[in-house]
Image: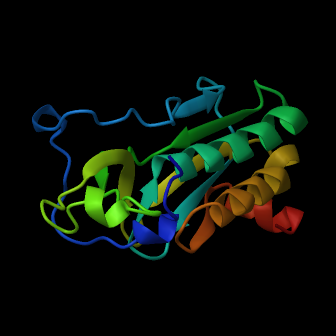
């Protein structure tokens, strides 16, 4: 079945719904790799993608953002010349009350009776100032990393900003 629009699950409402041991049939998150690139090298520049508003980010959006950044960095810089980490984990279980539509659906469905919903996916709860992604590169790939993180922020349901946490003098001299 088609997934509902992400705007239905973006706002944080109610308490966390994360206890999977009491639920049945919670699908696994699509994002499985949270750390990519060269973990051992000490890079000159570190940039972070920081959320500006509180929201829930679905696991599919996290995966889309990760793939976008990873592809851009892997193609241009190579696998040994960058580091990428996704910080939030999608613990929050998203439920959906599926409704029957079409001719004769009113005879089949029970309306809003027992409308708790079934698990359809997971999301990560993110708050203002929380770090979503961390990227590290050397000075020759600094602009590339900033562009990649900006493209990833477009795929997320909250406004984000790219913050330079290490090597700010180098990025200023490069004009980034």
Instruction: Check the image and report above or below for 155 versus 84.
Output: below
Q: Quadrant of residue 171?
A: bottom right
Task: Give the residue at x 47% y 63%.
Answer: 102
Res. 92 visible in picture:
no
In-front residue for pair 75/106: 106
Task: Give the residue at x 89% y 38%.
Answer: 76
In-front residue for pair 151/97: 97
In-front residue for pair 31/101: 101
Task: Give the residue at x 29% y 36%.
Answer: 26
Is residue 62 shown left or right of residue 169? Answer: left
In-front residue for pair 41/60: 60
Q: Position of residue 13 (x, y in %)?
A: 25, 72
Instruction: Check the image and report above or below for 5 versus 137.
Output: below
Q: Quadrant of residue 44?
A: top right
Res. 106 visible in picture:
yes
Is residue 37 shown left or right of residue 134? Answer: right
Instruction: Check the image and report above or below for 93 versus 7.
Output: above
Color scheme of the displayed model:
rainbow
Is residue 121 shown left or right of residue 151? Answer: left
Q: Quadrant of the C terminus?
A: bottom right
Q: Quadrant of residue 173?
A: bottom right
């Amino acid at each position: 079945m088609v997934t509902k629009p992400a705007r239905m699950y973006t706002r944080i409402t109610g308490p966390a719904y994360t206890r999977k041991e009491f639920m049945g049939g919670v699908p696994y998150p699509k994002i499985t790799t949270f750390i990519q690139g060269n973990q051992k090298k000490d890079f000159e520049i570190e940039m972070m993608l920081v959320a500006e508003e509180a929201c829930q980010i679905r696991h599919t959006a996290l995966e889309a953002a990760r793939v976008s950044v990873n592809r851009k960095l892997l193609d241009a810089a190579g696998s040994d010349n960058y580091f990428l980490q996704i910080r939030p984990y999608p613990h929050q279980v998203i439920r959906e009350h599926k409704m029957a539509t079409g001719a004769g659906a009113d005879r089949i469905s029970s309306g809003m009776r027992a409308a708790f919903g079934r698990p359809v996916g997971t999301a990560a709860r993110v708050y203002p100032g929380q770090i979503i992604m961390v990227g590290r590169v050397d000075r020759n790939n600094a602009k590339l990393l900033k562009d990649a993180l900006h493209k990833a922020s477009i795929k997320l349901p909250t406004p984000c900003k790219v913050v330079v946490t290490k090597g700010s003098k180098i990025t200023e001299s490069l004009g980034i």
